[in-house]
Image (spheres, rainbow, N blue to C red):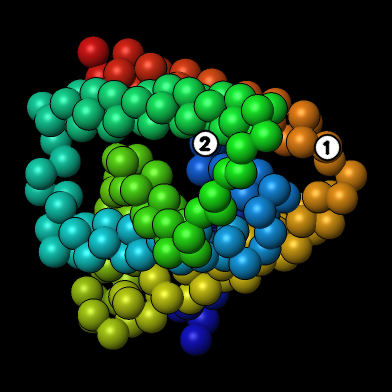
Amino acid sequence: MADYLAAFPLGFILSFSFGPLFFILLETSISKGLKKAFFMDLGVVFSDFVFFTVAYLGASKIITEQNQPALFILGGVMLSSYGLLSFIKTQQKKNKIKKGKAVDEQNLISFPIKGFLLNIINVAVLFFWTGVLFVVGPKFEMNPVKIWTFFLLTVGTYVSVNLCKYYLASKLKSKLTDTVLFKIKQGLNILIFVCGLYLVYKGI
């Protein structure tokens, strides 16, 4: 059991990894509630599962100095595109509300899809899980049961800590006006766009 203890602090650190996704999940819990933030997190977890599987099957062999720039540019373009489109879409929703038009609520299924897509375009997550395998793989002698148990404990800790964050953040909902939420969303979209441009710059 002692071999698995590192999974708990690792999951805790993951839940406080400051990036675009961190703010998106918090904003979702504030503006749309804990349930929808949780469902978005399920998409993030599934993308982590995909990354970990790829890393486990040997993705480290394709992560070389030669192809890292291309991966960063691809991820940056996708991230910037998301931020720009989301900024425009949020502005359009605000205009519809001003005109008195009803805005349809997103289906619950769209949140895990959104979480999956936002995380899967972040190539740094693949590098992270590959690095984790480099550390824990030899210790577990590449035993698949032990390695996947470590992964599940890490992700379980990550989700548990996030649920606590979402609960606390959702309590702020009654104190936030629509104008404040709009500014938070647009500020977030700008942040995502800038992060994408930074990845493109880093790749170039």
How many marks the image carries: the answer is: 2
Is 5 placed above or below 49 here?
Answer: below
Write the residue at 24% across / 23% down.
73
Residue 23 image position (x, y, % from top left) = 61, 40
Near mark 1 (Cα within 10 A), the count class, few <14, some 14-19 or many ≥20, is few
Query: Which residue carries the number 1 mark?
Result: 177
Residue 21: image x %, image y %? 51, 43
Neighbours of disc 2 within 10 Å: few (<14), some (14-19), many (20+): many
Question: What number is the disc on residue 88?
Answer: none
Q: CA distance from mark 1 to mark 2?
A: 22 Å
Q: Which sits in the foreground, 28 or 204?
A: 28
> Residue shown at 38%/80% (left/top)?
149
User: Which three-letter amino acid code belongs to the residue tagged 1?
Assistant: Thr
Say which quadrant the C terminus sits in.
top left
Q: Which residue is mark 2?
A: 20
Q: Is residue 24 visible?
A: yes
Residue 184 drawn above or below residue 158: above
Q: Measured from the top left, where is residue 9 in percent x and y?
A: 59, 63
Residue drawn 48% across and 76% down? 153
The answer to whether residue 184 shows anywhere in this view is no
